[in-house]
Amino acid sequence: MKKIRVVQVNKLYAPIVGGIERVVQETSEGLIDKNDIDIQVLVCSGKRKTTKERYNGVKVIRSGSIGIYLSMPVSIRFFGYFKKLSETADIIHIHMPFPLADIACILSGFKGKVVVWWHADVVRQKFFMLFYAPVMKRLLKRADCIITATKGHIESSKYLRHFKDKCTIIPYGIDENDFKKSEDSEKIIDKYKVFENSKKVLFVGRLVYYKGVEVLIDAFSEINGAELFIIGEGALREKLINKVNNLGISDKIHFLGRLDDNKLKACLRDCDMLAFPSVSNGEAFGLVQLEAMIYGKPVINTNLPTGVPYVSINNETGFTVEPYDVKGFAQAIQRMTDDDELRMKFGKNAYKRVKDNFTKSNMINSVYEKYIELMLNK
């Protein structure tokens, strides 16, 4: 049997770090080990110059772009590379939302199989969606298969509900060895910690509106015996720092900025719990929940209609509270701060849930099996 030629298409690729970028990288690197798959990756470079390389064995084309608009790279060259790759591809696998890829696929006239991995709805850019929605719907109609990580992705999306018959659920996955073999030995959090016996609550993510960090800070004004460590950068950083200072709680909330991957892993290892206070459907899953849970850490997340509360289960691997519920978040953190036995129990359950449901090998094999199925049903 000849090799199945697959092109995975996304905005960006490693070493740029992001949840979707990690999924693209891990599936691509996993699939090159399959003897009957020939995989290439097409992304934008974020710079004007186009580069072609092998990254950890994967053939990657980074199309030169003229800038970023509405969080999306803009590249004219991208269309040419898409067209050229589509001429020999059996499967084009597009990670959405990525308007450039939608348009390129429709214009290319590609006749092979189209796989869409739907990661999240576009929530805030309502004016932009007036123009993009018709294109996106056309691609969804064209797609032979739509992958989502959870059932919540389908049920919460105003677009996917019309294409339920095409949807297949493949949960994101991580590999325990990827985390524990490369973590930093230094105890990063302890350098910032003020109170000797306080519990360490970790937040990891961009400091933007939908991550709900303001809710978390307000909650900490009511919490005793815990300190919050915030990892990440973003447009709200200065506003959040001012809020902490105005509330007079700067002794128990610490901004660590952006950390490299190994230091981040060390913080996940050394914290007592993860806070995940997202408030918008723009948060569809939250891979960092899995990353904390593989270290046996409980999670306090929010009851969004997306896949977020499916990852960490209320009263099993942590607590789930309503979005924007400051008091609920404070009570959940306080309870796990005060009850060591409960916290440890949730942490053990969290580790088991990842091992049972969210492994990288299962994710890669499920994508591979879907490719084979599509090619057998030509």
Image (spheres, rainbow, N blue to C red):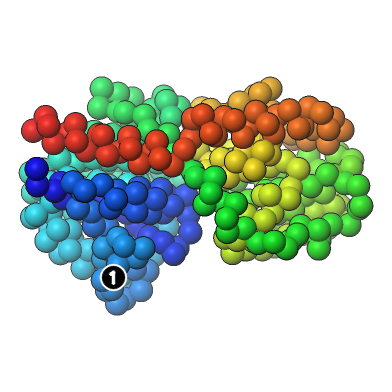
Q: Is residue 348 visible?
A: yes
Could you say which is closer to the camera, residue 93 or residue 270? 270
Hey, which quadrant is residue 142 in on the image? top left
Label 1 residue SS: strand
Q: Please state the total of marks drawn on the protein image.
A: 1
Q: Position of residue 86 (x, y in %)?
A: 13, 54
Residues packed near mark 1 inside 10 Å, few (<14), some (14 to 19) or many (20 plus): few
Is residue 13 found left or right of 372 in the rendered image?
A: right
What residue sits 21% from the left and 68% below the top? 77
What residue sits 41% from the left and 61% below the top? 14
What residue sits 34% from the left and 53% below the top? 29
Q: Position of residue 100 (x, y in %)?
A: 26, 55
Q: Position of residue 217 (x, y in %)?
A: 76, 46
Is residue 256 found left or right of 68 in the rendered image?
A: right
Q: Quadrant of the N terminus?
A: top left
Taking 20 as reference, is 309 above or below it? Answer: above
Q: Is residue 103 visible?
A: no
Q: Position of residue 133 (x, y in %)?
A: 29, 41
What residue sits 62% from the left and 54% below the top? 265
Taking 104 as reference, is 60 above or below it? Answer: below
Is residue 194 found left or right of 108 in the rendered image?
A: right
Hey, which quadrant is residue 332 in on the image? top right
Q: Quadrant of the C terminus?
A: top left
Is residue 162 found left or right of 26 in the rendered image?
A: left
Q: Which residue is mark 1?
A: 53
Q: Amino acid at mark 1?
A: Glu
- Taking the view exactly as shown, the residue that stands out farthest to the right is 196
